[in-house]
Image: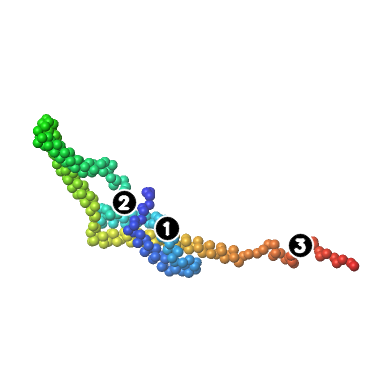
Amino acid sequence: MGRPSRLGDEDRSDYASALDEVIASPEIRRLLERSGVPADRLRVRGLAAVARTATAADAEYRRYAAVRLHAQGGRRDARTAPLSGPGDQERSGAGVLAVLGVLTPVLAAVAAATFLLLGYGLRLADTLPALADTLVGVGWFSLAVAGVAALVSVVALYRTAARQSAAGVVAVPDPSAADSPALAQARRAWLVALRDRGIRPLLLQELAEAASAQGAGERRGFGFSSPAFAGPDHSGPMFEGSAPPAPRQP
């Protein structure tokens, strides 16, 4: 048998409603009046024991969750996914590649402008023609690298944006499927099992313990007796065997 299913956040309101229904039942109301326990205190105890009571209806809850997931098209809401977790974490090299994709075109364009300015400057000055030709060639090559890097960066950014947009699409369930008889029946079966096998036994146990503690307190309060002073031979604070001193003769 696997671990019990954890109650989803979307089902907390149903659990609270089921708890209120059990507290409002004639049986629990009658026991509340006898024990003197406030209903608000009993409700707080029931909400705190959600993990314990939900386990009693785990089989019905699993079926209800499966039917609801099927009605939603087999996809979970992307907005309820954890911020980080197995399979959703960012790869370690993604940040480095993004930085390189932005910096490479900029650096290549700066280098191309520098080489071209120096090369054409030397040509205008008619000095060092070999060096001027080399600088001009390197400048045009850097400019081509900058253009290619910029194109690759644009394509990569477009693909990343398209992938994130597709991953963030929320599956909107079909209203007719959400109101299907199978889903309503599964939810009703889960709530009945939750009330009868989980919440009601817990509340009855809490009320029984409160009544037992109250009865024990009353017995302690009215059953006091002193073994030192309750004996039939007790006549006063004098000790046995002691007698008052005889009066002195003149």
Colouring used for the render: rainbow
Q: What amino acid is at disc 2?
A: Pro
Could one spot residue 176 in this view of the protein?
yes
Q: Secondary structure at mark 1?
A: loop
User: Which residue in the structure is indicated by mark 3?
Assistant: 239
> Which label's residue is closer to the chain start, 1 or 2?
1
Across and down, in percent, residue 1 comes to: 38, 49
> Which label's residue is closer to the chain start, 3 or 2?
2
How many marks overall? 3
User: Which residue in the structure is indicated by mark 2?
Assistant: 82
Marks 3/2: CA distance?
A: 80 Å
Q: Closer to the camera, 235 or 139?
A: 139
Marks 1/3: CA distance?
A: 60 Å
Q: Could you tell me which residue is drawn at 55 percent across and 64 percent down?
A: 215
> Which label's residue is closer to the chain start, 1 or 3?
1
Across and down, in percent, residue 246 comes to: 85, 65
Identify the mark at residue 12; answer none if there is no mark. none
Across and down, in percent, residue 91 comes to: 27, 43
Q: What amino acid is at disc 1?
A: Ala
Say if 87 sits above or below 45 in the image: above
User: Which residue in the structure is indicated by mark 1?
Assistant: 49
Marks 1/2: CA distance?
A: 25 Å
Across and down, in percent, residue 42 comes to: 44, 63
Is residue 153 rendered to the left or right of residue 124? Answer: right
Quarter of the figure with residue 55: bottom left
